[in-house]
Image (spheres, rainbow, N blue to C red):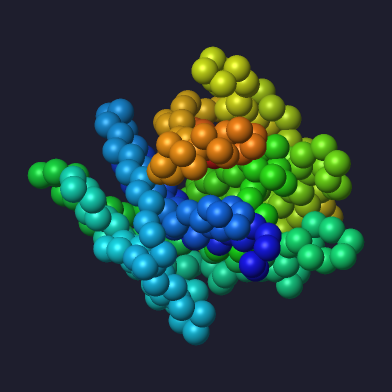
Amino acid sequence: QNRKPYSEFWYYLSVNEAGAVIISHFSLAKINLFFEQFTVDFGIYLPDGTTHYYSQSYVRSEVESESDRFHIKLRENTLGGTLESQRLQIKDDNVAVDLRFDSEVPAYRDGDGRIYLDKGKQDYMDVTYQPAMRVEGDITIGEQRIQWRGWGYADHVRQTFIPTEFAGRLYAFRVKMGDLFISSLDYFTNPGIQPRRLPSLMVTYKDRIIHVGHDYHLEETATYEDSERGISVPSGFRLSGKSGTFEISCSVVGKLLQRVDLLSTMGTFKRSILSFAGVSSFDYIFSEDVECRVASSEVSGLFSGKGVLEVVQ
């Protein structure tokens, strides 16, 4: 990986019983021969509107990662365990996070997990999904201690490119409604890259996956207007699909929780060069009211709940 970009990301999401949301990324990225970025970020969004967002970059000497076991450490922030159970620990001056993510459904890789983006099979992304996780632990914000209990999702992505070079938009949606969990991940690729859309839909029920598919319809129904950037960002949609005995139809309506500049931890000089080169990346995080109708041999009915949509563009 000496000459081309390479990035590796660990992503964790949880929604607790009160509707609070936490999202965290551990990121190791080599952008080009001159720039690399090692970051931890997390956001906490409470039902009363209180938010706390933290993002910090690190130098290579502060990074530990191992190939023979699940262990990543960026200074005092750690992530480790097994595919079945992981512990997430993050600290800053005002917040301490200590959460355990336990799988209800086995980790999943679509096919062999590797998606090639070119005929020569030089550019790829590897994705390992961990849907429908149980999450427990503690979060301390100043003097406030929150005993956390809820559902979660995690994934691990390795790719030989920086996402904004490949995808004009990344669309990631997750929700758990009782025993039903839904994850939708869509890459809308830049002009000149085929296919123009890489969709992936996963549905689990209780302790098993009941559907994985790539042929479904996504219709945007609402947008958030980012006046600073002069763009519209999808904030609501309808999702529908049918495959064999499985059928799904969802209505999703969202409210912005946070707009994050993913390059904000870089120094002014690095950011100015990347901006001149046209490199930018923003994450728009929405809380979503979700209603889904599902029909399958395993479960049928109308489900509703709170989900999270992230749009990166």
Which quarter of the figure is the C terminus placed in?
A: top right
Q: Which residue: 18% across, 45% down?
A: 94
Residue farthest along the left direction in this orientation:
143
Depicted 91 relative to depicted 21: above or below: below
Question: Which residue sits at x=38%, y=51%?
Answer: 57
Q: Residue at x 64, y 57 (%)?
A: 5
Q: Where in the figure is residue 276, as x and y percent of width and height?
A: 61, 33
Of all residues shown, which one is farthest toward the bottom? 68
| The furthest residue to the right | 119
Where in the figure is residue 218, as x and y percent of width and height? 73, 36
For this rendering, which residue is in front, 245 or 44?
A: 44
Of the pair 178 and 101, the residue shown nearer to us: 101
Foreground residue, 81 or 69? Answer: 69
In x, y percent, where is residue 122? 79, 65
Q: Quadrant of residue 301?
A: top right
Q: Quadrant of the N terminus?
A: bottom right
Disc tally is 0
- Name the spot of residue 95 as percent of width and height, x first: 22, 48
Q: Is residue 165 above or below residue 159?
A: above
Q: Is residue 113 left or right of residue 20?
A: right
Q: Is residue 137 left or right of residue 182?
A: left
Q: Is residue 142 visible?
A: yes
Q: Is residue 79 visible?
A: no
Q: Nearer the viewer, residue 160 or 237?
A: 160
Residue 33 quadrant: bottom right
